[in-house]
């Protein structure tokens, strides 16, 4: 990516957020598996598509200068992840809630990563929104590099 593009700083921040999000999600998922806390099939599909793959796909699109599509996918993925996580980890009663997650060696990891994910996803949502606002109103660039 050309570092002189108006999006380069925001894309760099978004990339860092998505990498951090992916790493924290892996630890969070390990806590779920280790304590045998599983969601429904629909939960699993949402987690795989929206929480894992969509943010990575958004960054790849942004790196390829597909500004509008990448921005929209990043915003939707991070906002969707945030809403899903806050609802399941802090509002909905059950084993996926931070106060009722099963006691065990992974309980602390689950609780810490649930909070970290909410913070990271909020930051990712704001970055996605900033990119959307910047890119929906601009004309497409013509990239003349070979």
Image (cartoon, rainbow, N blue to C red):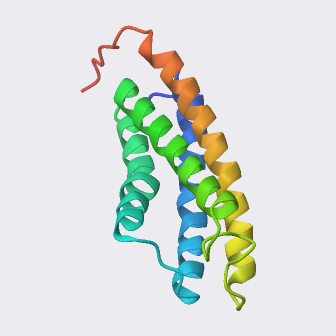
Question: Is residue 4 rendered to the left or right of residue 86?
Answer: left
Q: Residue at x 68, y 67 (%)?
A: 113
Picture quadrant where residue 64 is located = top left
Up/down of 95 relative to 45, above or below: below
User: As displayed, is residue 88 above or below residue 131?
Assistant: below
Residue 134, x across and y down, in percent: 52, 17
Depth check, front residue: 94 or 33: 94
Residue at x-position 71% and y-position 59%: 116
List x then y, in percent, for residue 114: 67, 64
Q: Nearer the viewer, residue 127 or 60?
A: 127
Closer to the camera in the image, 30 or 40: 40
Picture coordinates of residue 22 (x, y %)? 53, 60
Residue farthest to the left?
A: 146
Q: Residue at x 67, y 79 (%)?
A: 101
Q: For this view, does 132 lie left or right of residue 54?
A: right
Residue 12 visible? The answer is yes
Quarter of the view holding residue 67: top left
Is residue 5 in view from this perspective? no
Numbered-mark total: 0
**Image spot of residue 41 (x, y percent):** 34, 70
Residue 140 higher or lower than 102, as above or below? above
Q: Quadrant of the N terminus?
A: top left
């Amino acid at each position: 990516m050309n570092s002189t593009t108006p999006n380069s700083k925001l894309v760099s921040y978004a990339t860092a957020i998505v990498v951090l999000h992916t790493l924290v999600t892996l630890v969070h998922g390990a806590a779920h598996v280790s304590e045998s806390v599983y969601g429904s099939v629909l939960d699993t599909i949402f987690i795989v598509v929206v929480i894992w793959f969509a943010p990575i796909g958004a960054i790849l699109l942004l790196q390829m200068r597909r500004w509008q599509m990448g921005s929209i996918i990043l915003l939707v993925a991070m906002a969707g992840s945030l809403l899903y996580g806050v609802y399941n980890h802090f509002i909905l009663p059950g084993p996926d809630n931070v106060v009722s997650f099963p006691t065990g060696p992974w309980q602390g990891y689950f609780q810490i990563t649930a909070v970290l994910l909410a913070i990271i996803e909020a930051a990712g949502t704001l970055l996605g929104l900033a990119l959307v606002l910047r890119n929906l109103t601009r004309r497409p660039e013509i990239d003349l590099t070979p």
